[in-house]
Image (spheres, rainbow, N blue to C red):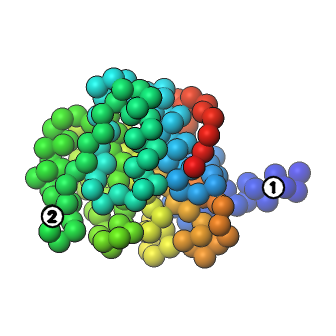
Amino acid sequence: EEATDLYERARGKVAGLLGAPSPREIVFTKNVTSAFNTVALSWGAANLQPGDRILLTEMEHHANIVPWYMVARRTGAELEFAPIDDEGRLDRDGLAEAFGRSPKVFAFTHVSNVLGTRNPVTELVAQAKAAGALTVIDGAQSVPKFPVNVAEIGCDFYGFTGHKLYGPTGIGAMWGRRELWEEMEPFEGGG
């Protein structure tokens, strides 16, 4: 009972950190790669089909590429990468073209770990939703640096890792809308 209570209090603190509507929408993982694996290999396995498009950006960390590559191979979905410009920002015309091809998923970073680019996530989520895409955000670089509010952002999933917050290695979390967790298929593996 004590362990369960501590676990649930931790879930509540993470929900508060992310501005999540409910602690029950927080899933703990080994790291952010494992968080993306959870979404890509569980939600993706249940919802992606041959010909569906998975849109990423050219500024993604490996952790937000490999899980989508793996689920694309398993489901027959296609990966596409939105380009960046010479200043390390998303090429907005290229992104608009990619949204015009109706991606089923748009997975992207809030803040690039290499470029330092801070993406306008609320605007990008709105564009993705207008195109009919599920949105998955890599918050590994943003959560430690400034306040994040997933309810205001309007995304579907938002993941981060504990060691970027000066916590221990081997912990991460993924917030997701409750109804999306219920659509997931179980999978073997992790990241």
Callout in the foreground (1, 2): 2
Q: Please tell me which residue is depicted at 22% across the width and 34% down the height of the picture.
A: 102
* Circle on res. 158: none
Q: CA distance from mark 1 to mark 2?
A: 48 Å
Quadrant of the rendered image containing residue 128: top left
**The residue under label 1 is which amino acid type?**
Asp
Rendering coords of residue 2 (x, y %): 88, 56
Give the mark nearer the N terminus: 1 vs 2. 1
* Circle on res. 5: 1
User: Relative to 113, is 151 above or below?
Assistant: above
Whether residue 105 sits left or right of residue 189 in the image: it is left
Q: Please tell me which residue is depicted at 27% across the width and 56% down the height of the picture.
A: 58
**The residue under label 2 is which amino acid type?**
Asp
Residue 27 appears in view: yes
Whether residue 26 sits left or right of residue 56 in the image: it is right
Rendering coords of residue 89 (x, y %): 21, 65
* Circle on res. 85: 2
Q: Please tell me which residue is depicted at 48% across the width and 64% down the height of the picture.
A: 140
| Residue projecting furthest to the left | 93
